[in-house]
Image (cartoon, grey):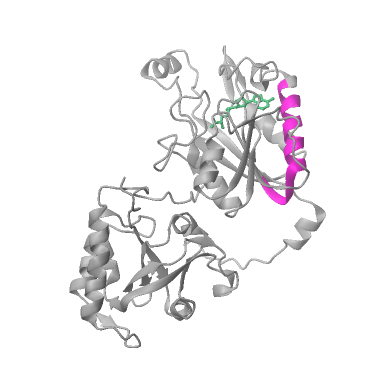
Amino acid sequence: MGEEKPVRGFIFACTDRTESECYDRMMLAADRTYGPVVIRIREGDLLFLHNLDTDALHGVFRAVSKGDFNLNAKAWNGRYPYQIHFEYIGNNIVLKNAKGILAKISVTRNTPLIKEKLSSLLEIFMINPGITNSALSLYDKDTTLLILNEKEKVDKNKNDVDIEEEIPMLEATTMWDFPRQSYGITPKGNNRYPGVTPALIIYNMIWRYTDPGDLVVDPMCGSGTTIDVCKEEKRRAIGYDIHPVRPDVIQNDARNIPLDAENVDMVFIDSPYGDNVRYNEHPDNIGNISSESEQFYDELEKVMEESHRILKDGKVLGWLIGDQWVKRKFTPVGFEIYNRLCKYFEPMEIVCVNRRGQSSHTGLWFNRARRFNFYLRGFKYLIIVRKTSETFSKSSTRKIEWTHYDRG
Ligand SMILES: C[S@@+](CC[C@H](N)C(=O)[O-])C[C@H]1O[C@@H](n2cnc3c(N)ncnc32)[C@H](O)[C@@H]1O
């Protein structure tokens, strides 16, 4: 990659009601849905504004800050906390039929504009100056030259790509299925580590339950997937393991976490769960205790107690766990873990995560499962619970006006 970082483009949205605030503040903004896109934007990237009511596309703008959380907490009454400051590149050009233009170059709000896509959008702005904002003093000719200058920068670094082609959207249902262990350009964790966690599970957890800058702890973090996801998504992270395999993982027993009480914004744990996965031979590795024995759950309960202690009030723990079927014996590990968690926490959700990439997911094992009448484990539970206290549950009581409809 060259010395200059490649210029990328990003589309923001507004409505007639929110448009003027963008120009008054010289800021563009989005809600949590597009938070993962906004935090990836850096100074110098190009920005466009799509007014959804008029279907007009405004541009071309340049980011003069990086995309961040709550640059101005009061703006838009706090409804759009993922924000960025911008400046005009010449006149503000307003193009009609934005949906048509964006569809033609296959761009949505979570697909950054890179390479040819950005270049062709800039070209559309150059050849079709649309209606300009007359309050600005430059002539269209100068604006065209300024956009051409940006286009040349984009074309020069066309082969350098440092952002994923599609920023993952957050899951909307409780059924998750991720085809790959990692996402994005840099690897997250080590996909050869036994029992490595699919990175998008952690991505979804932190985008739902934390804000940028929050502290996330993974007491059993193995190959460090949680650390890598947090770094990319701008959260702080501490990862421990009984047997660290990389230098930024701290050696520690999860039953005794060296952190003060009430300091942490989220805990994520993908714990050992089955007798058929060997993580390491460390004597304190809980994975070496059979999940058919009561002791296994007693030891993990100590991890739950510690997680509860370090979490701030109202904050969330995600625990990923699978059931076991070994030597013709089924053990509902997930249910037992759920019951133990409920001793300390308020249950919030159970998500079903498709188990892909298992060594037993081969034609041979599929045939055996049919022939000998057993099932291969097809899913894991992601149990989501929250630390609550009297004060938290009282202060969070709010009335929600649901829309009712009749089933015809
Ligand atoms: C399923 S793996 C975690 C995978 C990890 N999330 C990743 O993506 O690589 C479970 C981990 O728990 C760790 N472990 C087992 N007993 C532990 C203990 N007493 N304290 C801390 N970690 C422990 C194991 O060493 C193993 O790395």
Question: Which quadrant of the figure has residue 300?
Answer: top right
Front residue (pair 221, 46): 46
The number of discs equals: 0
Residue shown at 65% from the left, 40% from the top = 217
Residue shown at 76% from the left, 56% from the top = 392
Q: Is residue 117 left or right of residue 193?
A: left
Q: Is residue 158 magenta?
A: no
Q: Magenta residues? A: 296-316
Q: Position of residue 337 (x, y in %)?
A: 68, 31
Q: Quadrant of ligand 1?
A: top right
Q: Quadrant of the N terminus?
A: top left
Q: Position of residue 347 (x, y in %)?
A: 68, 45
Question: Which quadrant of the figure has residue 132?
Answer: bottom left
Front residue (pair 125, 158): 158
Residue shown at 52% from the left, 65% from the top = 405
Q: Is residue 22 visible?
A: yes
Q: Position of residue 141 (x, y in %)?
A: 20, 79
Farthest-out residue, front: 3
Q: Is residue 362 above or below residue 87?
A: above
Q: Is residue 123 above or below residue 271?
A: below
Q: Is residue 170 left or right of residue 287?
A: left
Q: Is residue 302 magenta?
A: yes
Q: Position of residue 7 (x, y in %)?
A: 33, 57
Q: Is residue 133 above or below residue 400?
A: below
Q: Is residue 104 visible?
A: no
Question: Which SS does the magenta portion mostly show?
Answer: helix
Residue shown at 49% from the left, 22% from the top = 375
Question: Which quadrant of the figure has residue 380?
Answer: top right
Farthest-out residue, right: 390
